[in-house]
Amino acid sequence: MNGDIVKIIDENGIEREAKIITTIKEDGIDYVVYVINRDGDNSNIFVSRLVSGVEFVDIVDKEEKERLDGIVKNIIKKAME
């Protein structure tokens, strides 16, 4: 799955290509970390719950978002070392 390109619909209803960076399992929940290139110069990294191995579900719980933010920042930091 890592490196795969998938099509997703963003928060504005626009279809975008997302490149999967990695999948992680935290507290028994599967997550997918992916990047969307917004305009050629800027990219955004996102994390979603991964349901049934194929469906990306937005994370709405603030504490869950904050916890995953730290995990993803750590993954990126280690990749940059």
Image (cartoon, helix red, strand yellow):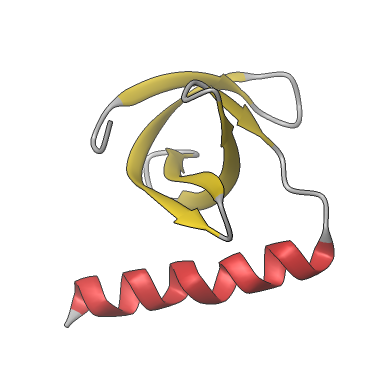
Q: Which residue is farthest right? A: 61
Residue 32 picture location, percent across and down:
47, 43
Query: Which residue is found at the position 55% from the left and 21% from the top?
Result: 8
Where residue 57 sits, quadrant-wise, is top right
Is the N terminus in the top left, top right, bottom left or bottom right quadrant?
Answer: top left
Say left or right for 76 vs 71.
left
Is the C terminus in the top left, top right, bottom left or bottom right quadrant?
Answer: bottom left
Query: Which residue is found at the position 43% from the left and 43% from the top?
Result: 34
Residue 73 picture location, percent across and down:
45, 74
Residue 65 picture location, percent across and down:
70, 63
Vertical placement of residue 72 versus 22, above or below? below
Where residue 56 sits, quadrant-wise, is top right
Vertical placement of residue 57 versus 23, above or below? above
Where residue 49 sits, quadrant-wise, is top right
Residue 4 picture location, percent across and down:
27, 27
Say left or right for 10 vs 37.
right
Query: Which residue is found at the position 52% from the left and 44% from the top?
Result: 30
Q: Nearer the viewer, residue 27 or 1?
A: 27
Q: Which residue is farthest front? A: 28
Labels in figure, total? 0
Vertical placement of residue 31 versus 26, above or below? above
